[in-house]
Each structure stands twice: as structure tokens, then as C-alpha cells.
């Protein structure tokens, strides 16, 4: 939410794919909340496509139905159809093309583009970014009654007691109980989120069929992921995704492609900051060598078997380069997390964000943390006006092996020297950039 788009848009991974590896690229669907109308660099090549919006308003019409998209083919504004009131501006219509449902529209248009460019001389990249399951999580009319017998999971942190939340920062500690009516609203939101995913399932199946049809399925990497987790009653938070706990920060990712054996998993912490370097790496580019260098690191070496004959030469070269660059250096044991409050945000009768206590930076360890807390969260909280954390005033520490739902803050039971080391490591991760983010992991950590 606090992004300088003037720095982001000109140097996205797509611009490097297009300009340095001769990829044609297409974007279909949501592209950040502040979406440029004209295609940014990388999406304006003669064969590229830009069909994007900011996700639409969180009300109808404009989010899931009757959405407006910027529509540019080869860098030029598309015009001349009943859906273009002005050149380069597509307006969906629930009585017309694809019934006006945004997931179906971007699915069909992306599939059409892939079939067009997939048989051409250039390699291609396509992003299909649905609004679903973002609130208001409006399902397609044909899926409106699915999952009617389901309810949100009642995990131990659902509607947790005041005593269980007393050790948390102010926003959580002051939460009132979830009422029966609010619980019903949570359940309906849960069902609607699942319903929107059925259209995304259709989009994925359609794209896989298209790739198979053009003979590109076995040489294509497919990434399926999201932006955030979500609150559905945990810690008395009935909605939204602005908090530091696992139900917000954990993100699913499934990857398929050459050299990846079915069922492969890895336990190493990675996040959306690693997606760009991974995409570039699979295309034979180095995310640390571009300008400006990317903060993340390619996860391809954790997944792709370089000996598999199906692996493409560009990917094989990337795996070799990664081995030479990093040598025996271990993958990180934790990941950095940060959030700067949007102010007072109320959802389903509960304050889910506030300007005074819910700006945070954190380290989420999966291993390698202090003795007894290898799988842990360390978080520092402050007011958004103290965005540089010079006066952070609250700390939370959770041992997720013993307390997977993050209900028991261990800050008062953690030795001072361990907290000092955790703070120093967090500060180093907060300040780092590019490859320095990996080296900072080991430079300041002493128990």
C-alpha cells in the first residue's frame, strides 16, 4: 500500500524478460492498486499485451462485474468493439462478453493471447491475476450456491478469549468477542471466497489445455500463488489481512514445470520477494545482476533437477550460475516481514488495523532461531508515524512448535541477550538491499 510506483513500474521483472531475454509478455487482470493506464516498460513490445486494472472497487459494479480494464495490444490502444467506449478502455458487460465476470474475462483473453503468441518465435510470459478471492468475494452467478454446507474452520485461535489475547499488542488485546451474527458473516465470506476460486480453477484448467494444444505444456513453468493469507475469526479478527500472524503472512504456492518432480516440497522460507528472481532465473537472467538488483533469491535450485533432460538450456545455465555464486551457502532460515498501517480499518464490526499499534516489522523463522524457539516469530510494533522504528514500544515472540496459533507471547520469558540479537538481525534485514539481504542473515546473528 506504500509503494512508489514510479520506481516499481519501469523496472519490473517483465521489462527484463522482454528487453534482455527477448520474451513477449502479457498481463491480464489486477496489477497493483494503482494501475497505470498505458503499459509500463516491458508490456509495450509489438507482440505484448496489457489488459489490466487495479482490481476494481470493493463494491459492485466495478470489482467482479462490469469491470473496466486498460486494453493495449502491442503497446497500442485497442478500439473498435462494443466494449470500448474509448480507445484502450475495455468496459465489461454482464449481458455481453463472458457474462461480464472479471475472472472469466481475463481467463479467456489470456488464453486467446497465449494461443496467438505460443506458436511464434519468441518465448512468452503471461500473468493472469484474478481479483478473487479478494473482498467482496463475489462469485460467478453459476457458482453462487456452491459450498453452502461449509463453514470457516473453528481453530483454537478462532474467537480466542480475552485472557489468551492479553499479551498481544493493543490492536489484538482490545478485540471484543465475535458475536453469533458476526460468525455467520465470517462463514458466508468463507464460502464466497471458495466460490470465487472455482472460476480461478476454470481459468487454470483452460490455460493448461491451451498450453497443451499449442505443444508448450511440457516446456512451460506454471506458478499458482496469492498475495496474502486472511483473517476468518482468528485472534478475534473477522476479516482483512493486515496482521503479523501466520493466518495472514503464509501464502500458498504451487509450481509445475520441466525438471520438477511431482510432489516435490521444500521447507525453506521464501515469499513474493523471491518470485521475480525465480522467473528471471528460469529464463537465464540473474535477479541480482539487474539494475536495481532484486532483494529476493531464485527458488529454482530448491526445486529443479538440473540433470533432467526436459530442463531448458537457459534454466540449466541459471542453476549452474546459482551454484557458482552461492556455493555451499545455506538457504535462509527465516524471512523478513514488514507492514505500515493504513490507519483505522473496521471490518465486520472489529477494528483490524490502527495507526498507533499495528505498524510492525518481524522475522518469521522456520528453523535456526534461538534455542527452544527454532520455529518462531519475532515482531516489533510501533505507530505508523514512527515508520523508521526508532521508538518501537512492543515486542511479540511466539514458539510455533508449542504454540502454532500464536496465543502465548514469550517476550517476558526470553533472555535479554537473545532479544537483543533478534533486534539486531531484524534491523539488518530491514536496512538491507539486493544480495546484502542474504549476507546480513549471518553477519549479526550470535546466540
Image (spheres, grey):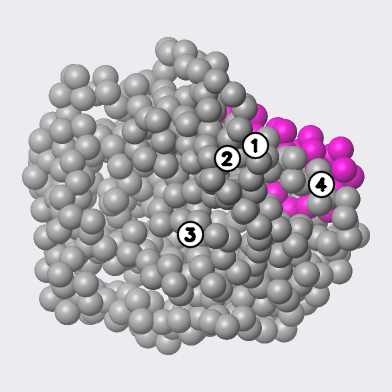
For residue 26, side relative to residue 137 (left or right): right
Q: CA distance from mark 2 to mark 3?
A: 18 Å
Residue 84, labelled with which disc? Answer: 2
- Ranked by sequence position, the earlier of labels 2 and 3 is 3
Mark 4 surroundings: few (<14), some (14-19) or many (≥20) residues within 10 A? few
Q: Is residue 211 magenta?
A: yes
Q: Nearer the viewer, mark 1 or mark 3?
A: 1
Count of residue discs: 4
Residue 303 occupies quadrant: bottom right
Q: CA distance from mark 2 to mark 1?
A: 6 Å
For marks 1 and 3 on the same chain, the one whose residue lies earlier in the sequence: 3
Q: CA distance from mark 3 to mark 4?
A: 25 Å
Instruction: Please provide percent x and percent y for residue 434.
Output: 51, 81
- The image quadrant of residue 189 is top left
Q: Which residues are magenta?
A: 196-223
Tell which tag, 1 or 4, sits nearer the viewer. Answer: 1
The residue that disc 1 covers is: 81
Residue at numbered disc 3: 36
**Residue 107: quadrant of the picture:** top right
Look at the image and say whether residue 75 sits in the magenta stretch.
no
| Mark 1, secondary structure of its residue | loop
Tell me the SS state at disc 4: helix
Amino acid at each position: 500500500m506504500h509503494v512508489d510506483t514510479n520506481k516499481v513500474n519501469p523496472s519490473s521483472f517483465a521489462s527484463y524478460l522482454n528487453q534482455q531475454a527477448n520474451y513477449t509478455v502479457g498481463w491480464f487482470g489486477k496489477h497493483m492498486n494503482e494501475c497505470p493506464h498505458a503499459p509500463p516498460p516491458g508490456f509495450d513490445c509489438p507482440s505484448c499485451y496489457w489488459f489490466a486494472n487495479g482490481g476494481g472497487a470493493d463494491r459492485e459494479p466495478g470489482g467482479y462485474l462490469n469491470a473496466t480494464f486498460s486494453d493495449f495490444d502491442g503497446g497500442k490502444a485497442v478500439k473498435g468493439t462494443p466494449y470500448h467506449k474509448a480507445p484502450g478502455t475495455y468496459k465489461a458487460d454482464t449481458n455481453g462478453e463472458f457474462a461480464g465476470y472479471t475472472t472469466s474475462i481475463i481467463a479467456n483473453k489470456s488464453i486467446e493471447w497465449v494461443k496467438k503468441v505460443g506458436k511464434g518465435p519468441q518465448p512468452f510470459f503471461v500473468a493472469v491475476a484474478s481479483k478473487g478471492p479478494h473482498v467482496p468475494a463475489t462469485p460467478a452467478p453459476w457458482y453462487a450456491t456452491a459450498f453452502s454446507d461449509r463453514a470457516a474452520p473453528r481453530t483454537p485461535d478462532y474467537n480466542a478469549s480475552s485472557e489468551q489475547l492479553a499479551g498481544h499488542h493493543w490492536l489484538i488485546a482490545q478485540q471484543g468477542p465475535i458475536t453469533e451474527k458476526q460468525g455467520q458473516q465470517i462463514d458466508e465470506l468463507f464460502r464466497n471466497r471458495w466460490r470465487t476460486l472455482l472460476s480461478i480453477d476454470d481459468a487454470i484448467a483452460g490455460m493448461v489445455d491451451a498450453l497443451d494444444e499449442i505443444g508448450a505444456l511440457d516446456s512451460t513453468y506454471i506458478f499458482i500463488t496469492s498475495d496474502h493469507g486472511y483473517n476468518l475469526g482468528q485472534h478475534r479478527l473477522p476479516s482483512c489481512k493486515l496482521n503479523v500472524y501466520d493466518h495472514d503472512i503464509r501464502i500458498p504456492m504451487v509450481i509445475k514445470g520441466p525438471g520438477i518432480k511431482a510432489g516435490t516440497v521444500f521447507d525453506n522460507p521464501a515469499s513474493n520477494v523471491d518470485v521475480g528472481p525465480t522467473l528471471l532465473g528460469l529464463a537465464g537472467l540473474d535477479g541480482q545482476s539487474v539494475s536495481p538488483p532484486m532483494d529476493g533469491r531464485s527458488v529454482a535450485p530448491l526445486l529443479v533437477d538440473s540433470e533432467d533432460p526436459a530442463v531448458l538450456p537457459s534454466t540449466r545455465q541459471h542453476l549452474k550460475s546459482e551454484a557458482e555464486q552461492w556455493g555451499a551457502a545455506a538457504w535462509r532460515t527465516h524471512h523478513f516481514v514488514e507492514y505500515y498501517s493504513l490507519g483505522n480499518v473496521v471490518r465486520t464490526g472489529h477494528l483490524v488495523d490502527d495507526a498507533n499499534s499495528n505498524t510492525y516489522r518481524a522475522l518469521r523463522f522456520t528453523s535456526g532461531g534461538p534455542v527452544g524457539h527454532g520455529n518462531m516469530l519475532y515482531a516489533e510494533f510501533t505507530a505508523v508515524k514512527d515508520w523508521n522504528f526508532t521508538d518501537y514500544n512492543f515486542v511479540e515472540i511466539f514458539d510455533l512448535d508449542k504454540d502454532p496459533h500464536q496465543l502465548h507471547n514469550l517476550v517476558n520469558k526470553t533472555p535479554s541477550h537473545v532479544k537483543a540479537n533478534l533486534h539486531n538481525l531484524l534491523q539488518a534485514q530491514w536496512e538491507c538491499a539486493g544480495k546484502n539481504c542474504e549476507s546480513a542473515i549471518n553477519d549479526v546473528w550470535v546466540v
